[in-house]
Image (cartoon, rainbow, N blue to C red):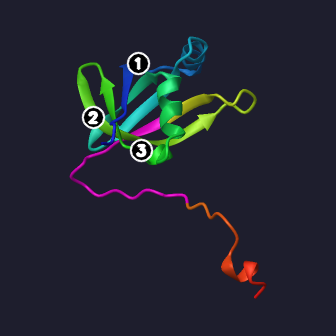
Amino acid sequence: MITQEIVEATERQAGANKNDNRRLRRAGKIPAVVYGAGSAPVSLEVEPKQITKILHSKSGHNTIFDLKVGGATAKAMIVDWQYEPLKGSIMHIDLKRIAMDQTIQVSVPIVLTGVAEGVRLQG
């Protein structure tokens, strides 16, 4: 059985600026925005542990999870994220709402392991 990830987020006030984002990061949260599926973009704040867990999972940023904002729940996935260059912590993430009845395109990284047959046989 596959466990479904649930990310709980809090909606932020409209018009948040750079200083608001800095205060949010100092409080240990990550500023985020969710958009797509025919709905207006919404500014959010999320817990870094939940996002890090998803990014380090087998499916990585292609993981579709339940995004819980207030009382509403929607399917979402991570589209883009920014790391702080010195600390390596996540500075910001972009989330995309997923309509489960529509097709989407995602990029899937392919990691090759081992030695190629031609190299191994020197031919």
Q: Which quadrant is home to the C terminus?
A: bottom right
Residue at 49 percent across and 58 percent down: it is 108
Between disc 3 and disc 2, the foreground one is 3
Determine whether the residue tagged by mark 1 lies in a helix, strand or loop: loop
Residue at 44 percent across and 48 percent down: it is 62
Question: Is residue 41 shown above or below 61?
Answer: above
Q: Position of residue 2 (x, y in %)?
A: 33, 42
Between disc 3 and disc 1, the foreground one is 3
Rendered image: mark on residue 12: 1
Left or right of 46 in this view: 64? left
Left or right of 37 in this view: 118? right
Determine whether the residue tagged by mark 2 lies in a helix, strand or loop: strand
- What's the amino acid at mark 1? Arg
In primary-sequence order, the first of circles 1 and 2 is: 1
Dividing the picture into quadrants, the one containing residue 114 is bottom right
What secondary structure predominates along the stretch shown in magenta?
loop
Residue at 37 percent across and 23 percent down: it is 8
Q: Position of residue 67 (x, y in %)?
A: 33, 31
- What's the amino acid at mark 3? Thr
Rendered image: mark on residue 102: none
Q: Which quadrant is home to the N terminus?
A: top left
Dividing the picture into quadrants, the one containing residue 64 is top left
Residue at image mark 2 = 74
- Magenta residues? 94-109
Between disc 1 and disc 2, the foreground one is 2
Q: Position of residue 86 (x, y in %)?
A: 75, 29
What separation in Å lies between label 1 and label 2 (alpha carbons)? Answer: 17 Å
Residue at image mark 3 = 63
- What's the amino acid at mark 2? Ala
What separation in Å lies between label 3 and label 1 (alpha carbons)? Answer: 24 Å
Dividing the picture into quadrants, the one containing residue 25 is top right
